[in-house]
Image (cartoon, rainbow, N blue to C red):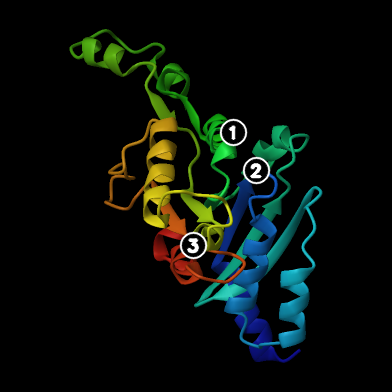
Amino acid sequence: MGLLTIIKKQKQKDKEVKCLLLGLDNSGKSTLVNRLQISCSNEKQPSLEVDKMTEITPTIGFRIISFPIKDNLISIWDIGGQTSLRPFWNNYFDKTNILIWCIDISDLNRLHESINELRKLLITKSCDVEGEQGEGEGDGDGDGDAEAEAGKDVIAVDCKIIIVLNKVDLISRGDCGATTGQEDIENQVRLRVVSGLSLSLADDDGDGSPRVSFVTCSALTGVGLRPLAEELSSPDSL
């Protein structure tokens, strides 16, 4: 390994973006990682592409896939979505820059389950987060406002959140038996997620950037992955 290669790898390491990929089983998480790795690879290997996109098995435990996007090294922690693994999801949040939550948009029967699991991960009450800060503080003006805010749902994780609406190809082909159009289903899912998480689409971190963003794609065909790659490598991801 040459000196320039070592320097390049170290620079990428300094700009590493840790992404935690979660979602229900069979939502297409592993396919999503494989497709991203292929599309972002500088060296195209057709035989490797076929293997990665055809030999997909459920993730037992977790795996880590790393690849460069622009000047960043994207490290995706692909965690299994089986019911038995979900209680351990919180253990992987340390030093996470981005949470990617994958939803199978073609299976609306499991949407409530997906939103509920995401809510358990993200949402807590503001009184739980700020309770310790309020202890010992004197009573003053504005107590009424503070009481009104107490118990409000807030996002309890300190990272960027990307919700991926996956398997849009199944909707466009009609394989999921949908009787409404693709755009209508996308909007329906977005609204149900926002409502289920008690969010506003205008919520942000104070700098105008969205607290939660949505990306619609097909991990199988690669449609819509460019906006996802841009989200992963954007400056606010570090």
Location of mark 2 (residue): 24
Label 1: few (<14), some or many (≥20) within 10 Å?
few
> Which x, y percent locates residue 41?
62, 81
Residue mark closest to the camera, 3 vs 1: 3
The tag earlier along the polypeptide, 3 or 2, is 2
Decide if residue 171 is on the left or right side of residue 76: left
> Which x, y percent locates residue 213?
40, 51
Assign the N terminus to one quadrant of the image.
bottom right
Identity of the residue furthest to the left in this view:
141
The tag earlier along the polypeptide, 2 or 1, is 2
Residue drawn at x 54%, y 68% as measured from the top left:
15
The tag earlier along the polypeptide, 3 or 1, is 1
Please name the amino acid that badge 1 sits on: Glu
Location of mark 1 (residue): 113
Q: Report helix, strand or loop for mark 2.
A: loop
Residue drawn at x 40%, y 45% as measured from the top left:
190
Decide if residue 184 is on the left or right side of residue 206: right
Q: Tell me the quarter of the picture where residue 222 sits.
A: bottom right
Location of mark 3 (residue): 172
